[in-house]
Amino acid sequence: MLKKFRKSIDTIDKQLLDLLNKRAGIAKKVAEYKKNSNNKSIFRPDRESEIINNLRGLNKGPLESNHIHNIYREIISSCLSLETNLTVSFLGPEGTYSEIATNKFFGNSITKSSKKNILEVFDAVKNNMSDYGVVPVENSNQGSIKTTLDFLIKYKINICGEQNIAIRHCLMSTDGELKNIKKIYSHNQTLSQCSTWISKNYPNAECISSDSNAQAALQAKKYKNSACIANETCSTLYGLKIVSRNIHDIHNNTTRFLIIGNTAINQSKNDKTTFVMSIQNKSGALSKILNILSMNKISMTKIESMPTKDRNWEYLFLIDISGHIDDKKISSTLKKIESACKYFQLLGSYPKSID
């Protein structure tokens, strides 16, 4: 009976292989058609989002929706690599949550470029050294990453997509022992997310901020009686042993990453639009903007204020809404909002994260 099952699997695998290569062949023809018609938009996050969401909806199991997502993410990535070689910059070094977000959004058939900080990611995209960049923008517990928001406004780069990643922090060291840990390295946001656990378990340990959790892993490996807090991938990459898993204080912990690029993204069936504005400092100014959204029945999913940087006590408002700028209702509504603002900047319309 076992031999019969294995034979069936072998037959199905051959069929799958034939179909995958057939799919890849059609993808190459699509690329050639676009090249001949001077259509340069080979990477289409909107189209990929539609494909994956449609397949998740058609899925009847026993594979779960996230399995379908992961499988087709790699199929699409592999087919795309036959059309073009995408270069994607991310906040490194290797093993960061930014790299995990990069793999989740683009798949593994790309050229990845690790950068030391968020500014380097923006510079690489702005100067066309990378096709896209992946940067963290907010955490569900700690809020927004101001550096990313500042650079989005300054560099006028498009938001091309987003990817939510569940955060699972682990304490790790060279020997994996609970005792003798005197220093704990990690990114300052990670230290904050694990502060209660650290206070309870290592009240006397010195917490030292690193540029990234992956860099913290390198420091923990280098210095005696040291540990780091990072994702489980880092333990394998940097030869560390896990002391304790899931040490974050709030377990519903998710970080949102943005995919940035120099091209506008076409409309899909489930989009988000982000813009930033400043308004007159007078009574009812913000209420007027919110009423425009309400009257047009447009859902606002986020609003956040931040200093303008050039004038004290004046603020910009960053707003996320559901919908795409190519939708007539969204476009006309944003024109009304722009006319009521001192300053308006569209940051991008893009597919919502597939979680």
Image: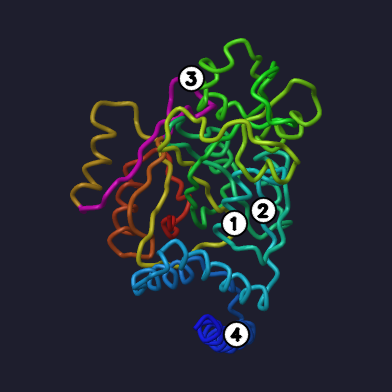
Q: Quadrant of residue 238?
A: top right
Is 18 included in the stretch rendered in magenta? Answer: no
Callout 1 amino acid: Gly
Residue occupied by mark 4 = 17
The answer to the question of whether label 1 and label 2 lie on touching residues, with beta carbons closer than 8 A, is yes
The answer to the question of whether label 4 and label 3 lie on touching residues, with beta carbons closer than 8 A, is no
Task: State the image coordinates of residue 13 (x, y, percent, origin top left).
Answer: 57, 83
| Image depth: mark 2 or mark 4 in front | 4
Residue occupied by mark 1 = 261
Residue occupied by mark 2 = 125
Going from N to C along the chain, the mark reached first, 2 or 4, is 4
Q: How crowded is mark 3: few (under 14 residues within 10 Å), some or many (20 or more)?
A: some
Q: Nearer the viewer, residue 328 or 139?
A: 139
Going from N to C along the chain, the mark reached first, 1 or 4, is 4
Q: Residue at x 53, y 15 (%)?
A: 199
- Disc 1 and disc 2: Cα gap in Å? 6 Å
Callout 2 amino acid: Val
Q: Residues within 10 Å of mark 2 (few under 14, many from 20)?
A: many
In the image, the segment drawn in magenta is 296-316
Task: State the image coordinates of residue 252 (x, y, percent, origin top left).
Answer: 40, 38
- Above or below: residue 100 compared with residue 55: above
Residue occupied by mark 3 = 196
| Image depth: mark 3 or mark 1 in front | 3
Q: Which residue is drawn at 43% across and 40% down?
A: 343
What residue occupies the far top of the structure in this picture?
204
- Disc 4 and disc 3: Cα gap in Å? 50 Å
The answer to the question of whether label 1 and label 4 lie on touching residues, with beta carbons closer than 8 A, is no
The answer to the question of whether label 2 and label 3 lie on touching residues, with beta carbons closer than 8 A, is no
Is 310 included in the stretch rendered in magenta? Answer: yes
Quadrant for the C terminus in the image: bottom left
